[in-house]
Image (tube, rainbow, N blue to C red):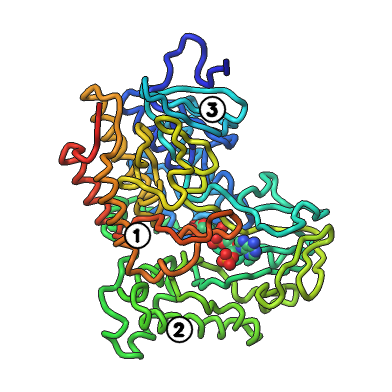
Amino acid sequence: MPAPATAAAGALPPEVIIIGAGIAGMHQLYRLRELGLRVQVFEAGSDVGGTWYWNRYPGARFDSESWTYGYSFSPELLQEWEWPEHFSAQPDTLRYLNFVADKFDLRRDIRFNSRVTAASFDDATSHWTITLDNGEQARAPLLITALGPLSAYTLPNIPGRESFAGPAYHTARWPHEGVDLKGKRVGIIGTGATAIQTIQTIARDVGHLTVFQRTPNWAAPLHNRRITPEEQREIKASYAEIFERCRQTSTCFIHQTDPRSVFDVTPEEREAFWEKLYGEPGFGIWVGNFRDVLTDQAANDLASAYMARKIRERVKDPATAERLIPKNHGFGTRRLPLESGYYEVYNQDNVRLVDINDTPIERITPRGIQTSAEEHAFDLLIYATGFDGVTGPYDRMDIRGPGGRSLRQAWTGTPRTFLGMLAEGFPNMLMVLGPHTARGNIPRNIEEIVDWLTGLVAHMHKHGLARVEARPEAVEAWCQHVDKAAAGLLFSQVNSWQTGVNRNVEGRDIRRVLGYYGGAVDYRRRIEAVAANGYQEFLFN
Ligand code: NAP
C-alpha cells in the first residue's frame, strides 16, 4: 500500500490537487484558497517558479515588457514590487515569484521535490489519484494541471551523446550554482530564442564558441534598459490602463496589430514604419506590424526582405550573413526571438557558425562534435534544443481516465479538448494552458484561464456537483473551430514547437494545431459566454 503524499495524520484530504507551482499553479492555488478549498500542490522543483525556476541559462530574460508580465490580481503586490528592467532577467523574475509566494504564504500548500509520474481517475468515486516518483500517492476529486507548455525539454537525438567527456547541459537544466565559461571552448546546438539569448551573453566570456545551426530564425532587437525612478512611478500609477490595453490585443502584449495592409502604403512609408518598429522595444515588429504580414505570403515576403537586409547590415562576413537568414520560413512565422547584439556576435574572432545542413553532425564524441567535415573539440557542450511543446508534459505522465484510458494514446494524432481546459473523456481534470488555449503574453493568458476555472469549480461547489466533463459535441465543435482559426495563418505551414513538431521525439514529425489562434479577445468572449450561459456545454453529476 503506497504511503499517502498529503498532509500530516488527521488532516483532511485535499479537495483539489494542482500539478505545478509555476506562474499558473501559484495563481490557481491562491484563487482556490479564496473559495475556501483545501488544495495540495505538487511541484517537481525544489521551489516555486516553474519556467523561471528551471531555465537559468546565461542571458535568460523576458521578451514581454516586465510591467505587463506580473500578476494583476493584487493591487498591493503591484505597488510593492519594482521591476528593475523593462525586460526582466531570469534572476529578478524568480525573485519576484518568490516574493509572491512569501507574500501570500503559498508554500504551506506546496510539496516540492515531488514529480507526479501518473494520475488515474476512479470512475466509481469520481476521484483522481496521483502518484509521485517516490511511489507516494494522493487523492482528490479535482485535478488541475499547471504543467507549463514548455517544460518537457528535449535533448538532441544525436548518436554518442553520452560519450562526451566534459560537462554538457541542456539550457532548461542549467546548474543553479552557475557555470564558469571563462576561456572555455564551448559548442552550442540550436539557434532558437533560448540559444540566441545564451549565445549573445556567453560569446564575450568564452575562449571560443561554435554555434551549430540547423534552421536560422528571424530575430529582432529587444532594446532593453533599466526602468528609471520616474518610469517606475508612472508604471505603478497606470497598471489599470496597462492591463486593459493587454486585454484589447490578440496576443495580450501591449502591441496592437496595425490595421493597415502592407500594400496600403508606399514603399517609403513601409520602410519608415519598419525602421520605427525595428528601433522600438519588444514585440511590436512582430505582433504590432501590418495586419497581413503574418497571413499574406506577398506581404510576408516584403517583411522578410526587410529583415534580411538588417542581418546583412549587421553581419560583416556576407557568407555568414546569408547562413543566418532563414530561407525555409517567413518572418514571424515562428515565435520571434528578441536579441541584444546577437548578429554582431558573428563578427567576433572567437565565434564560428557551423551550418549543419552543409556539414551534418554525425555523432558526439568524447572530445566534442564530429561533423561530416571535421571533429570540433570542446570543453563544454550546451544543448539549446528546445521542448516537446504543449502536449509533451502530459505525455511524460501516465494519465488514465475512466476505464484506464490513456491520455497519451487519446492524443496520439492530435489533442481533443473543450476550450483547451478539459480533455475529451477525462472528467474532473482541468488544464491551465493546455492545448487549444490562446497563448501570447503568458501570465495574462494564465490569469484569465485560472479565473475561469475557479468560476467553474465555484459553480460545482455551489450546486453540489461532483463530476464535470465536456459534452462530446462541444469538444467536436471546439476542435473544428480551433483548426479553422489556425488555417489561414502562415505559421501553420511551418515546423516549430508551436505546430507540435520536434524531430527529437518519436511521432512528433507531423504538424498539429496546439493553440487557439482566433486571438485572445475572441477566446475570452467565448469562454465568458460559456460561463454566462450556465456551462451548458458540460455534463455534470
Ligand atoms: P526552439 O525554439 O524549439 O529551438 C530549438 C533549437 O534547437 C532550434 O534551433 C532547433 O533547430 C535546434 N535543434 C533541436 N534539435 C536539434 C538537433 N537534433 N540537431 C540540431 N539542432 C537541433 O527552443 P527554445 O529556443 O528553447 O525556445 C522555445 C520557446 O521558449 C520559444 O519559442 C519561446 O516561446 C520560449 N522562450 C521564451 C523566452 C523569453 O521569453 N524571452 C526565451 C527563450 C525561450 P530546428 O529549428 O531546425 O528544429
Element assignment for label 3: strand
Between the C-alphas of marks 1 and 2, the distance is 23 Å
Which image quadrant is residue 521 in?
bottom left
Mark toward the start of the polypeptide (2 vs 3): 3
**Which x, y percent locates residue 89?**
54, 54
Element assignment for label 2: helix
Element assignment for label 1: loop
Name the amino acid type tagged 3: Thr
**Which x, y percent locates residue 422?**
34, 41
Seen as rendered, the residue at the extreme left is 533
Q: Is residue 44 above or below residue 464?
A: below
Mark toward the start of the polypeptide (1 vs 2): 1
- The disc placed on residue 306 is 2
Q: Quadrant of the N terminus?
A: top right
Task: Look at mark 3 in the image and give the residue it sits on.
Answer: 131
Residue drawn where x is 40% and y is 84% of the image: 302
Asked whether 535 or 26 is in front, the reply is: 535
Which image quadrant is residue 431 in?
top left
Q: Is residue 193 left or right of residue 330?
A: right
Name the amino acid type tagged 2: Tyr
Name the amino acid type tagged 1: Thr
**Which x, y percent locates residue 117?**
55, 34
Q: Quadrant of the C terminus?
A: top left
Between the C-alphas of marks 3 and 1, the distance is 36 Å
Seen as rendered, the residue at the extreme top is 10
Between the C-alphas of marks 2 and 3, the distance is 52 Å
Q: Is residue 119 above or below residue 475?
A: above
Asked whether 263 or 84 is in front, the reply is: 263
Residue drawn where x is 47% and y is 60% of the image: 63
Q: Is residue 198 visible?
A: no
Task: Look at mark 1 in the image and give the residue it sits on.
Answer: 251
Q: Residues within 10 Å of mark 1 (few under 14, many from 20)?
A: many
